[in-house]
Amino acid sequence: MVDATRKLLDELMGRNRNKENVREQNYWDQDVCKPYLLGCCYHTLWQHTKSDCGPCPYGTCQNERLKEVFEADDSSRQHRYRRRWMVELRDMLKAKVNDCDRNIDRAKETLAKRQAANQAAIEEHPEIKDLNKQIKEMAEEAESAGEAGDVSKSQAIVTKIETL
C-alpha cells in the first residue's frame, strides 16, 4: 500500500518532490522514456497481455510536460534525437512483433498436434468407426436410390443419416 501511495505521489508531484535543489529535466536525459516522447511507449502498449514487458523502466514515463517540450522544440537537436530514437523504437517494436509471431507459430503447431492426436483417437474408437461405416453405407444407398428415381426413399435415408 505504501508503494502504491508513493507511486501516486510520484505521478502527481514528480519523483523529486522532497528534494530542495531539483534540476530541470530535459527530454534528452537518460531517465526519460524516449518511446513515450515519440507517442508509443511499448511497455504500456502491451500492458496486461501475454506479451507484457513489465512496468516502464524510466521513472518519467508518461510525463506530458516533457512530451510537449519535445514536440514544441524545432531545433536540429530535436530532429537528430527524433531520427535516432525512431530507429531504436522501430527495432524494438520489430523484435517484439517477431517474438509474438514466434509465439503464435508455436501455438499453432501445438494446436495442430493436439488436433491430429484427437482425430486419431476419435477415428480409432470402435463406436465411431461403426457410425462412420453406417453413414457411408447409407449415403451410398441414398445416392443409388436417387439415381434410380426413388427420391422419397433417398430423402428418408438422408434424414436417417442426419439423426445419426
Image (cartoon, rainbow, N blue to C red):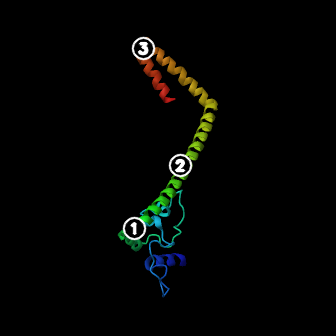
Q: Which residue is disc 3 drawn over?
A: 150
Across and down, in percent, residue 4 comes to 51, 75
Farthest residue, direction front: 76
* Residue name at image x 48 percent, y 63 percent: 44
Q: Is residue 33 above or below residue 112?
A: below
Secondary structure under the numbered disc 2 in the rendered image: helix
The quadrant in which the N terminus is found is bottom right
Report the Cα–Cα distance between label 2 and label 3.
55 Å
Q: Amino acid at mark 3?
A: Asp
Residue 98 or 112: which is nearer the viewer?
98
Secondary structure under the numbered disc 3 in the rendered image: loop
Q: Which residue is disc 1 drawn over?
A: 76
Precedes in sequence: disc 1 or disc 3: 1
Across and down, in percent, residue 42 comes to 48, 61
Which is more foreground, mark 2 or mark 3? 2
Which is more foreground, mark 1 or mark 3? 1
Report the Cα–Cα distance between label 1 and label 3.
87 Å
Residue 117 or 18: which is nearer the viewer?
18
Q: Is residue 20 above or below residue 30?
A: below
Across and down, in percent, residue 141 comes to 50, 17
Q: Is residue 68 left or right of residue 145?
A: left
Precedes in sequence: disc 2 or disc 1: 1
Q: Which residue is disc 2 drawn over?
A: 101
Report the Cα–Cα distance between label 2 and label 1.
37 Å
* Residue name at image x 56 percent, y 23 percent: 134
Precedes in sequence: disc 2 or disc 3: 2
Q: Amino acid at mark 2?
A: Asp
